[in-house]
Image: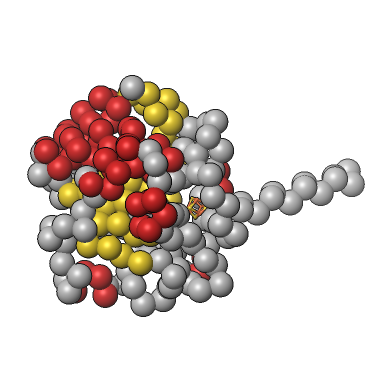
Amino acid sequence: METRIAQIVTCTEAEGPFQRMAIWFQGCPLRCPGCCNPEFLPFKGGEGWQVADLISLMLEAQQKEKIEGISLLGGEPFAHALAGAKIAQAAQANNLGVMIYSGFTIEQLREKPESEVHELLTATDLLVDGPYDREQPETERRWIGSQNQRVHFLTPRYDPLDPCWRMTNTLEIRVRGNEITVNGFPAKHALGLWKQPKPLKPEKASSE
Ligand code: SF4
């Protein structure tokens, strides 16, 4: 089975508790004003990945980078629920935790008719739900974009009282070859800075 992937970071501390592999799906049906990943919204784009290869990469990260779990982000993970469910089920079968960020509320997800949505929800330990609202930026809770979004501890795997939830947000910047990737939760005034390189000033014409 193939799915469209926008970005992968095999070990991050900026997308949920502990060290996690983060997988961003390519494609989201929602359009939250101020979405910080607008390039991940079209369903065309990204890279085609076999789900089996994503699971192999996840298990390799578990061995080599000692990840505690995975985070599925977007795009919208529940718009890729069949692939997401296979990945999440494989994660849990190998004692990895599953955290998901969704623009849908848990009530909306529970009302969806697609069985794969329910399979993915069943394989979720931690759900951050609801659309991003740029008018209500979150300043207290770590790893959460806006105040309307809720954290649902769907299994006992994660502890809402763990002090990690109150620590400062982090941003990670990686340079791989000639590519720069950025993930995490930047301060509000830094949002999108790395996506807006200043144009070079035109060279002055020589008078000689
Ligand atoms: S749900 Fe997430 S990815 Fe989709 S538009 Fe909203 S913020 Fe962007």
Residue 168 drawn at (x, y percent): 31, 72
Q: Measuring from the top left, give residue 117's x and y in whole percent.
A: 34, 42
Rendered position, 163 above or below 119: below
Q: Residue furthest bottom?
A: 140
- When the figure is inspected, residue 50 is found, relative to residue 41, above or below; the finding is above
Residue 30 image position (x, y, % from top left): 54, 50
Q: Residue at x 26, y 75 (%)?
A: 166
- Quadrant containing the C terminus is top right
| Residue 35 falls in image quadrant | bottom right
Viewer-side residue, 129 vs 113? 113
Q: Would you say residue 24 is visible in this rendering? A: no
* Residue 114: quadrant of the picture: top left
Q: Residue at x 61, y 53 (%)?
A: 196
Front-most of residues 92 and 173: 92
Q: What residue appears at the point 27 percent right and 63 percent down from the top-left corner?
A: 152
Residue 86 shows up from this direction: yes
**Horizontal side, residue 13 vs residue 60: left or right:** right
Q: Position of residue 158 (x, y in %)?
A: 16, 61
Relative to 189, say whether 112 is above or below: above
**Which colour style is shown?**
secondary structure
Q: Quadrant of the N terminus?
A: top left
The residue located at (16%, 71%) in the rendering is 162
